[in-house]
Image (tube, rainbow, N blue to C red):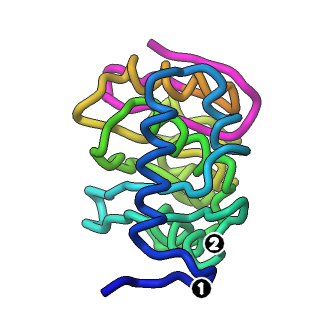
Amino acid sequence: MTNTCSKGLTRRALLGAFAATTVVAAPTYSNAFGFLRGAGDIRRLRMYSGRTGESIDMIYWIEGKYIKDALTEVNHFMRDWRNNKVKGVDPRTVDIMTAAHNLMDTTEPYMLLSGYRSPETNAMLRSRSSGVAKNSLHLRAQAADLRLQSRSVNQMARAASACAAGGVGRYSRSDFVHMDCGVVRTWGR
């Protein structure tokens, strides 16, 4: 029995294509973002949230197009978990996260610590910590704070930086990496 997608591709063919592109992308950090933009037929995102207990493992891009329903699920998953407010996540951030994940050659899903932050949540966090930006890209749903148990903060930051597509912050003491689709820049240790 085979599951057939609306474009006539079998599930097995899609998974095979994904496996092939992952193997091709894994050995090198060079031009990672370019790899995702042009060469891959599919893009897959794997994450879980320790805060909500939810997980996501989905293909969100096929044959040069984002899958609207998949991005809707990503938006809900990356919502402000403190008040359940949802905002459309910038797909460029999702692409950066995916490209970095592929470069690290791991099947472990990201742990999402923070995605979209409502103004109320950002203000509350700013009142507790000097490390929270007043105009954080989390407010625009253009950033994610992520962790992998199988990779160090330095490994994750190097992979994200190799994408040369946005900001990468290292938070070694808190064991996470910030990735965003803003101006290319790095900070932290």
Q: Quadrant of the C terminus?
A: top left
For the residue marked with disc 1, what is the amino acid? Ser
Instruction: Write down the residue under mark 2.
Output: 67
Q: Residue at x 51, y 53 (%)?
A: 115
* Location of residue 63 in the rendering, given as x and y in whole percent from the top left corner: 67, 62
| Other-residue count near label 2 (Cα within 10 Å), few / some / many at <14 / 14–19 / ≥20 | few
Q: Secondary structure at mark 1?
A: loop
- Viewer can see residue 71: yes
Quarter of the N terminus within the rendering: bottom left
Q: Quadrant of residue 52?
A: bottom left
- Image height of 139 relative to 169, above or below: below
Which span is picked out in magenta? 169-189
Residue 138, image x, y percentages: 60, 48
Eyeballing the image, is 103 above or below 123?
A: above
Residue under circle 1? 6
- Residue depicted at 39% across the width and 17% down the height: 154
**In which quadrant of the rendered view does residue 58 lie?**
bottom left
Nearer to us in this view, 167 or 96: 96
Q: Nearer the viewer, residue 10 or 100?
A: 10
Q: Who's the residue at 38% across and 48% down the image?
A: 113
Q: From the viewer's perspective, is residue 102 above or below residue 156?
A: below
Horizontal side, residue 53 vs residue 167: left or right: left
Q: Given the image, on which type of amino acid does mark 2 rest?
A: Ile
Q: Residue at x 71, y 44 (%)?
A: 37
Q: Secondary structure at mark 2?
A: loop
Residue 48: x and y in percent read 32, 57
Percent across and percent down for residue 6 are 59, 85
| Quadrant of the image occupied by residue 51 | bottom left
Which is closer to the viewer, label 2 or label 1?
A: 1
